[in-house]
Image: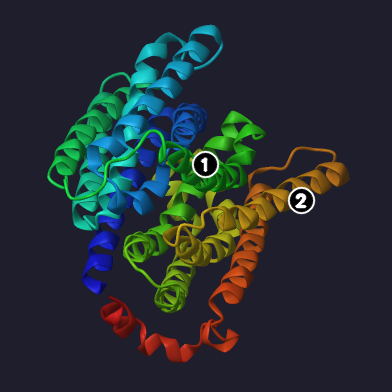
Amino acid sequence: MLKLILGAFFSRFLTAVLNFGTIIMISRKLGPEGKGLSTILLVTLVSVQMLCDFAGGAALVYLSPRFRLRTLLVPVWIWNALCSLGLMVFLMIESDHLMHPLAWQAAALCFVNASFSQHVHVLNGRQKFNITAGILLFQAMTTAGLLLLFLLDTPIIFDYFYALCISWGISWMISLMALWNTRDTNLPSFSYKTDLKRLFKNGAANQTGHLLQFLNQRIFYLFLPVYTLGIFSNAVALGEAMWMIAGSIATIQYGKIANMQGRQEAALLTARLFKATFWLTLAAVICVALIPGKLYELIFGFAFSHVKESLVGLLPGVLFLSGYLIFGHYFSGTGRFSINNYSIALGVIVTFAAFGIYHLVEHIKPNEIVASRITSLANMSIFISIFIRFRRDSGIPLKDLIPQFSDLGKIRYWLQKSM
């Protein structure tokens, strides 16, 4: 398992570096306002993708080993097409939207993005972790390379959109070929009469959590001015880049647990992976906190001088949410997607409550620094809630779940011996 996790981590690390390069290019060429507009562009596409994921989504990791490939993907593609057409109609009507002139192109890109994400989930469910890591790395590399080429001429906001169209399209084709090589006629066919409800039930339960988490992490994108949003979104991107550690471990954990039979075995694996994730993420958080703010100003440009302050406010939440990812994937891997939703819903409540209190007391909208602190507070509440639920479900003693310094010498052993 250690080899799989390291492969996933290095792939995610290189992907994060390339995505970071994309952020730098947009920030330096288009400034904070341009970065804010490109964020709105991406959020629009991702928001519809989250609607598409109600048909399976990340729950496809759980369903993938249980059904024949073609019969599972057809209903998912049909749902994606319907949601993408909905986006096209919306953009055609909403003349003030940034992507109004590119309504049908945005709909096509939305379908490609949503189905590509679902292809990755299916491949992970069939434990093709190295293949998915390679495809995601290729996608990030292609996006960064094309964007650099486009921005060398006369930089415009839609350069990012065109780069995504090409890189996502090529990646979609590669993922389709990878799926073809995993087809298995020995698995039962997906039945529209008996299994379609299960697809949407599992997908809806899982995706409700993703929507709530998206709302929790991105709610301030709706309230911050475009200029401030450009700064805050960079801090968020830097903070979330550290989730590559937890994400790499959780990806392998999810695929492994989805193919396990017993919950106790899955719970013991999760407890060990949580401790390993905590210490590795803590080390990353400390390193990032020590980086001087002038470096971010040097990288992004003079206008991004407040990125460090926003990032420091986000770091505690990064650590807490890394722990949530491990416990949350335990419940997802055992097919109990809705349990995670209660914890994330608590985080959303904390976010809105803190936002409301600040607004009532200060009588102004929160800035990027306050937004980062509220986000961390919400992430802390999410972690505490899921920790308590895991403790009750697994029956593992509390002392065996609390990270200790003695764990540091066991991390490599745990990752090597876990499956």
Instruction: Out of 263 and 144, give the one closest to the viewer.
Output: 263
Q: Which image quadrant is residue 281 in?
A: bottom left
* Label number found at residue 168: none
Name the residue located 58 percent from the left edge and 64 percent from the top edge: 316
Q: Quadrant of the C terminus?
A: bottom left
Name the spot of residue 93 as percent of width and height, x first. 54, 7
Q: Which residue is mark 2?
A: 354
- Relative to 240, residue 383 above or below: below
Outermost residue, right direction?
A: 361
Q: Quadrant of residue 347?
A: bottom right
Residue drawn at x 36%, y 89% is 409
Per the image, label 1 sits on a secondary structure element best described as helix
- Residue 310 in picture, x, y percent from top left: 59, 51
Left or right of 387? Residue 411 is left
Asked whether residue 42 is in view, the answer is yes
- Locate residue 365 relative to residue 411 in the image: left or right: right
Residue 41 in the figure: left or right of residue 363: left
Q: Nearer the viewer, mark 1 or mark 2?
A: 1
SS type, badge 2: helix
Q: Residue at x 57, y 88 (%)?
A: 399
List the single residue furthest toward the bottom: 406
Closer to the camera in the image, 419 or 149: 419
Task: Kindly tell me whether residue 145 is visible in this rendering.
Answer: no
Amino acid type of disc 1?
Ala
Q: Is residue 204 above or below residue 63?
A: above
Badge number at residue 204: 1
The kind of residue tagged 2 is Ala
